[in-house]
Amino acid sequence: MLGECQGGLLGPCVGERGPSADDRRRFSTDVAADAVAFCGAVAQIFHSLFKTLQGKPVVVELKNDLRIRGTLHSVDQFLNIKLEAISVDRSDSCPHLSAVKDCFVRGSVVRYIELPPDAVNVDALHDACRRESKELKKTVQ
């Protein structure tokens, strides 16, 4: 009926009783668990991708706008990166980095990673994302 109020995702209507505190807590924990599972699956896909790119040249852009070129040596599960034979794009603003040959970059300070276009199998990446999405949907239901 037009004008009839129905409680929904945004909450109860005026005069209706909303979900209890236990219901809200249970919902938020379920959503948080699903988000953690999803983020873990995505991180695992990227970790697998970067493992296949070891030995390839990459450009890592940091959150402070510093761009480091180098050869990808290793990546861990936190997406921390070890680069070899590095060079810095703005060596005039960071002269202390001109003497550095290898470096370790913490994953939380990375803004972008530029990969060589021929080194990434996009179809395999799409398939892995689809598989993870299907598995996540099965666990949520």
Image (cartoon, grey):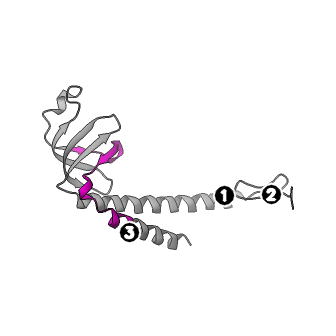
Q: Amino acid at mark 3?
A: Asp
Q: Which quadrant: the C terminus?
A: bottom right
**SS state under label 3:** helix
Nearest-to-viewer mark from 2 and 3:
3
Query: Which of these two is toward me, 24 or 117?
Result: 117
Position of residue 62 in the picture relative to residue 134 (left or right): left
Q: Is 77 situated above or below 128?
A: above
Q: Residue furthest front?
A: 118
State which quadrant residue 43 falls in. Answer: bottom left
Residue identified by numbered label 1: 24
Say which label, 3 or 1, has the lower sequence index. 1
Position of residue 13 in the picture relative to residue 56 (left or right): right
Residue identified by numbered label 2: 17
Q: Amino acid at mark 1?
A: Arg
Task: Residue at 46% x, 67% y: name it.
Answer: 133
**SS state under label 1:** helix
Say which label, 1 or 2, has the lower sequence index. 2
Q: Are marks 3 and 1 in contact (CB under 8 Å)?
A: no
Say which label, 2 or 3, has the lower sequence index. 2
Image location (x, y in percent) of residue 28: 60, 57
Mark 2 surroundings: few (<14), some (14-19) or many (≥20) residues within 10 A: few
Q: Is 123 situated above or below 113?
A: below
Q: Which residues are magenta?
A: 104-128
Image location (x, y in percent) of residue 86: 17, 41
Asked whether residue 91 is drawn in magenta, I would say no
Residue identified by numbered label 3: 127
Task: Residue at 23% x, 40% y: name it.
Answer: 68
Mark 1 surroundings: few (<14), some (14-19) or many (≥20) residues within 10 A: few
Q: Amino acid at mark 2?
A: Arg
Task: Residue at 62% x, 61% y: name it.
Answer: 27
State which quadrant residue 59 falls in. Answer: top left
Q: Are marks 1 and 2 in contact (CB under 8 Å)?
A: no
